[in-house]
Amino acid sequence: HADPVAEGRAHFERGNRAVELAERATGTRRQALLTEAHDAYVESLKFARNRNVLFNAAVVLAHLERFEDAFGYFTEYLAFEDLTPEERQEATRRLTDVATHVLVLDVASAPTGASVRIDREDVPPRGTTPLTLAMRPGAHRLRFELPGYEAAWVDVEGDAGERQAITEELRALPIMVTFRAPTGSSIEVDSTPAAADAELTLVPGDHSARVLPNGTETKFTLFPGDPPRVITLAVPRPVVVAPGPSPAPAPTPITEPRFGSWPTYLWVGAGVLGATAVALAAVAVGENNDYESNPTESRASSVDAANLRADIVGGAALAVGITALVLTLLNDDVPAERPSMELGVAPIAGGAVLGASWRPR
């Protein structure tokens, strides 16, 4: 395989020889030699964009009065950063001279990166924005193309030596968006009602959609050049709150009568004492009858003793009965104290003593 560098250099040297011959030729011979040199330089540039080849090709194109192409080559040459001041000055001088023969356009677009064609859409693009174009003086049409945006034509017109700035604001193409929602529901897209299975064309940017009336909002962003999108919307499921565990029933308070069973015991005691008092009263009546039938000193003592016993027991029965009545009236329920037992060990000389205490209810 041939060395690309060597092959590129061979074409460059062939172009230089043609230029040397053209300098001594005239008329059609000169034009033919310049064209041959240009073709050789173009072949060399296929192997590498060498700055020396670019400069020589630009000079030849200017001699051929192909000023638009010469302007492009000089512009590319001046983009090299390692040029010496002398080289940059010479190229700038030649570029300025070429610019007097062409209409120069500084072309830009928003967004950048659009390809630009001149006059026809079936020709190769001259480059992508931003770029500088040199054109024949007169009227022209520039076509801007960028994926995701509408193609745009811009009419320009100018004279030789004139320079214009052209900026085109490209319009993004709308994007087809299909919405999927539950059957029979209605949706809202960017605050505008729509059908559940609507197919809408939306411009690139931020959008939102939701199922009416209270669906969760879905936000989405469309970018220029996006393929058709499908957005699925859902109705939020109702939140079912499971019942919590039933609270434990409040403990039933343990109560007991304030005085316990004492009123009952007292009623029984009052009854026994009452019965005893009645019996003693009967005995006292019998003793009194005997005394009246045979009044003696001993019978008088018996009558007094019998009456005293009856009075004492009867008074006791009355007191116990009154106490039982009072306790019964006051014997309402009160919280019961649970019985408890406490154990303790106390050390003593030669051993220990175990103690226990019992607290009844």
Image (spheres, helix red, strand yellow):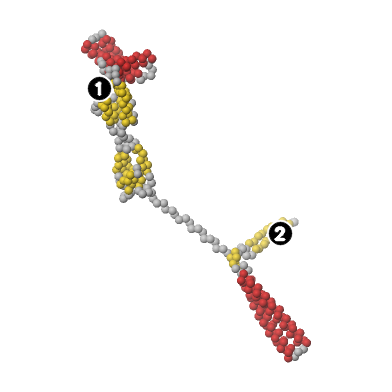
Residue type highlighted by circle 1: Gly
Residue that label 2 marks: 353
- Residue 240 is left or right of residue 289, and the answer is left
Q: Tell me if mark 1 has few (under 14), some (14-19) or many (20+) residues whose alpha carbon lies within 10 angstroms of its own.
A: few
Residue found at the far bottom of this picture: 293
* Rendered position, 208 above or below 330: above
Where does residue 271 sit, x and y in percent of width and height? 64, 78
Q: Quadrant of residue 299?
A: bottom right
Residue found at the far left of this picture: 28
Q: Which mark is residue 179?
A: none
Considering depth in this image, is 52 or 91 the residue closer to the camera?
91
Task: Say what secondary structure mark 1 lies in.
Answer: strand
Q: Quadrant of residue 117?
A: top left
Q: Quadrant of residue 222?
A: top left
Q: Which mark is residue 138?
A: 1
Residue type highlighted by circle 2: Val
Considering depth in this image, is 35 or 288 the residue closer to the camera?
288
Task: Say what secondary structure mark 2 lies in.
Answer: strand
Cα separation, mark 1 vs mark 2, equals 130 Å
Where does residue 46 sit, x and y in percent of width and height? 30, 20
Considering depth in this image, is 96 or 294 the residue closer to the camera?
96
The reply to whether residue 299 is visible in this rendering is: yes
* Rendered position, 63 above or below 127: above
Q: Earlier in the sequence, mark 1 or mark 2?
A: 1
The reply to whether residue 232 is visible in this rendering is: no
Where does residue 279 sit, x and y in percent of width and height? 67, 83
Residue sitting at x 72%, y 86%: 287
